[in-house]
Amino acid sequence: MGKGFMSYLAMKTDAAGGEAAQAALIDADLQELGVAARKLANHALVLGGGLGFGTTFLKWLAFFAAVYLLILDRTNWKTNMLTALLVPYIFFTLPGGLFSLLRGEIGKWIAIIAVILRLFFPRHFPDWLELPGAVILLIAVAPNLFASTFRGDLVLVGIFICLIIGCYLLQEHIRASGGFRNAFRKGNGVSNSIGILLLFIYPVWALNRERAGAGAVGSAGSLGLRVGQAVFSSASLLFMSVGVEFFSYTAFCFLVTIMGLVIPWSCTLAMIDVYSILVGCPLRVPGIMVIVVIGDWVLAILSLAAASSSAAVIDLLLQFHGSHCSPRFCGRYQLSAMMAFLSWFLTAASSLFNLWFIASR
């Protein structure tokens, strides 16, 4: 056997045939590696998609799009839009790992250094660092309601805020560019338009992935929204009516009337949410859901109209240098209008959550 093995090793083959065989073996190995790589990529996408890989990737894309717009704002390609709104957008879309890092000790140290530089050494604090510093400061000091709840359990609130910011920046950019055509034809218009459009990708994706009933009737999210509506509308009503002469202004009377309608509506639905949570059976009859959506939409529109008209009247009163409005009264009018705007926002959010639940059934 040893002699046969030695003769096998000593066997000579044709050089050209050996090279061809080696090339064939290498090609076969490369093909097998390619198949294995494709399988690995497919399995990674499947597993990663289940673990939120797509959402995480789009969060990074949204973060880089916001940073891209902040960079453009410091160049000759900028347009006249409120880029400070990108600060809350970054807060709600920042990937979890980076957010946790900046919310820990590292972020706190960066924030305190930025504050010290801004207060005591303003010459050494460049203007382009103000918005990044504001982002880090917001992440470091934000209460858990925003940092945990609106980014976790009630993530839909953060998503809707991001959508509102994107829509506002888009219309501001189009108006500053001189029209829709210029926003997508001129050099500075196209560069900003691309960045703004990228801002919409993550919120739309996350909106499709979230559970439709997260803020619908009978959920903890709905209860939180209803309590907020009742609190803000009650505060608006109290600031406007207690110890303040509002009867001379139709807009203020309209605001008091609408806030008086929002309070019983929100309290009634809050009691339904409490009952549904306690018994563990959400009351989501299609007919009732439609009535809730219509009621929320009507009250949201009326609340926005009342808050906007009251704010306009307050602005006119302030322009008369206090001759028609004492500082004490005007201050309470302003607080009432602000509370009404907050009540409108929460009412509109409830309506959108319930409408989304009905559409997804």
Image (tube, rainbow, N blue to C red):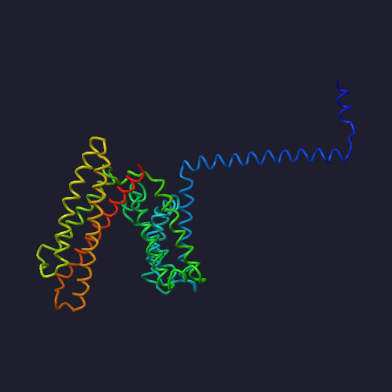
Give me the residue at 41% from left, 58% from top. Answer: 90
Q: Which quadrant holds residue 21? A: top right
Q: Residue at x 16, y 50 (%)?
A: 264
| Relative image position of residue 8 (x, y in whole percent) | 87, 28
Q: Is residue 58 left or right of residue 42?
A: left
The image quadrant that residue 122 belongs to is bottom left
Residue 67 placement (x, y as % from top left): 46, 62
In which image quadrant can residue 231 be found? bottom left
Is residue 160 or residue 26 the one in the foreground?
160
Camera-nearest residue between 340 and 306? 306
| Above or below, comparing residue 130 to residue 270 in the picture | below
Residue 276: x percent and y percent? 24, 39
Q: How many numbered marks appear?
A: 0
Above/below status of 185 relative to 9:
below
**Drawn side of residue 189 relative to residue 40, left or right:** left
**Viewport quadrant of the N terminus:** top right
Q: Position of residue 356 (x, y in %)?
A: 34, 48
- Residue lying furthest top: 1
Q: Which residue is more in the foreground, 289 or 16?
A: 289
Q: Quadrant location of the C terminus?
A: top left
* Viewer-proximal residue among 283 and 133: 283
